[in-house]
Amino acid sequence: MIGRLFNSHHHAATDTIITDRYLGFLIWQSLQSTLLYLLSKTLISPLLQSTYTITHILSTFILFHLSLLLFSTSLFLVSSPQLVRGVSPVELLFGVLRLVFVYGGQPLPVDFRRRVRVTLGFTLFVGCCCVAAYLAVVCFSGCEVFGALGFRSLVIGLVYGLHYVFTRRWILDFPIVQRPLFFSYKMGVRKAVVKAVRLATTGYLVSLLVPLFISDRKVAMRDLILDQIVFYFASCMVFLCWELNRHLLQVFLTKRYLFAPLKGSAAAATNPSGHLLVALEETSGRSLVHHLAYLDLCMVSESNVDTWRRAAFFEETGETYKKVIAVCLKPLEQLTLDLSEGLGSSVDKSTSPLSNQLRSPTELSSISRLHEPFHDFQVCAWSARIASSLTIRSHKEDRLGVAQLSGCNTSTISTLLSCLLAVETSMGKKTNIQPSNTQYPTANIKWAALNPTAAATVGITSHKKDGPHHAKAYSMADILRTSIYQIVSTFHHEMVASSKQGLLDKDWISNGKPLYGSRELIVHKLRMFLEFQAN
């Protein structure tokens, strides 16, 4: 009963995290947008040959903020901490046909419905950009609502919305170094200004096609040039507000949140890791709270800021440490299984290294799902860093030995190695298994390992390095290798002693079949790290 009350209370607390940040973002974006609005109106007023009443000034000011509220809300709704896939128009058409003629009115698959919602969300965002640009430009420039310049503002909003969606700028980028809000915001202002000018210029040039279809009233050349200057200036100011708001939203949403009770409170003494574990275990993998929980755990594991929280992981029962390691290894295990499925290799058929990894270029070129497992790249990268950092910290901070006795160290090493092999295979990298000492004399080991005819080649042939997944695969492989090397460097003496006794696989590799490859390949890969030859 107490546990359920704790979970319900924590869920209510985590639900308010995003709401509070969104409200804080709205307050600050309204302040900076008001400043830009007043500044731009002051600069552009000499060019506007019109006089306005107080009522008109107040109405345009309110309308401008309503347009920003529309844009900011739609921007917040489409923002995502990871890549999500939508459906193409062709897929949507076939889905509707299947719904009518095949399923007989039955609901479509859950994944397809989710992707349809994603596409509808992006479409709605583009529409909101058009409407928001239309209202904002009219408020800035004072042009006619139904004139050619008014309709051109719809075009620049369309250009911005399409650019934002197709360049995937809606994916939240978590900064490597967490800074205070002001400094994080200040570092992106220059890029926002440059981006706003470029987008405004592009939108302005594209919108020049509008007068070809909409005939505006005939004006003098001087007035025409003046209208173009005012429209371009208004477009720049609108996009500047939007870019600064987009950057401000990124700063607010990606700021670290502490999933911990107050230090010195009763909860900090009894259950200091409860809030964090609930956020890691019971939130959706696509949610922002889930990513913030991994970010918080990563900073606790790697830094010495909250050492009391890290010390609580190594409590005497070992249950907390096992739960933390389990939630860290789960994304890596899923990545390994997804890559294995994408490569067409079955875990059940991996008895021989050659049987599950050798593939022809024709087969590999037909693989279309290799990039999908890397959609959750950020969480996988954090997971590898957390598992490595906690394993390293356990060497000195785990006084009770719960990391080793619970088998978490062997699970961590095995999962990292299996994941690395799967990632390297998806990149087209080959791994050679060196022959054992029982089959070859010591003097011939080096020669046999370098001889391609004597080595069991594992991996795939050349793979396109310009594939959609290769950049993330390369980064993931580098993170995994760094994590394994850090563990091996810390436990090098123990691993070398186990290797000399022939117990390396028993002491540092989990029992059972690995997630990818064979047990012999995992041991061979670990020996390469021990000899600092894995690259």
Image (tube, rainbow, N blue to C red):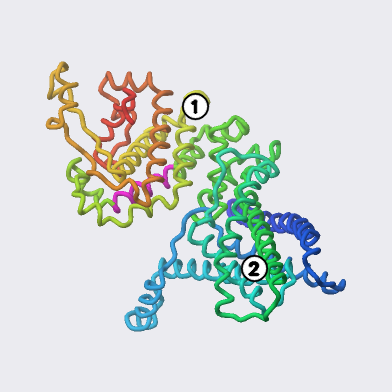
Q: Which residue is painted at 60% across and 46% down in the image?
A: 275
Q: Decide if residue 147 is on the left or right side of residue 61.
A: left
Q: Nearer the viewer, residue 176 or 277?
A: 176
Residue 456 lies, in percent from the top left, at: 17, 35
Residue at the front extreme, as displayed: 221
Q: Nearer the viewer, residue 181 or 407?
A: 181
Residue ID for mark 2: 133
Question: Which numbered disc, 1 or 2, marks the residue closer to the eye?
Answer: 2
Q: How many marks?
A: 2
Q: Is residue 296 magenta?
A: no
Q: Decide if residue 43 is on the left or right side of residue 278.
A: right
As drawn, 32 above or below 321: below
Residue ID for mark 1: 400
Amino acid at circle 1? Leu
Q: CA distance from mark 1 to mark 2?
A: 62 Å
Classify 10 Å Cα crowding around label 1: few (below 14), some (14-19), many (20 and above). Answer: some
Q: Is residue 339 magenta?
A: yes
As drawn, 520 above or below 116: above
Q: Could you tell which of marks 1 and 2 lies nearer the N-terminus? A: 2
Residue 419 lies, in percent from the top left, at: 35, 41
Q: Decide if residue 69 is on the left or right side of residue 124.
A: right
Residue 299 lies, in percent from the top left, at: 57, 37
Classify 10 Å Cα crowding around label 2: few (below 14), some (14-19), many (20 and above). Answer: many
Residue 250 lies, in percent from the top left, at: 61, 51
- Give the magenta part as a residue range: 329-342
Q: Which residue is painted at 48% across and 46% down in the image?
A: 378
Question: Which circle marks residue 453 in the picture?
Answer: none
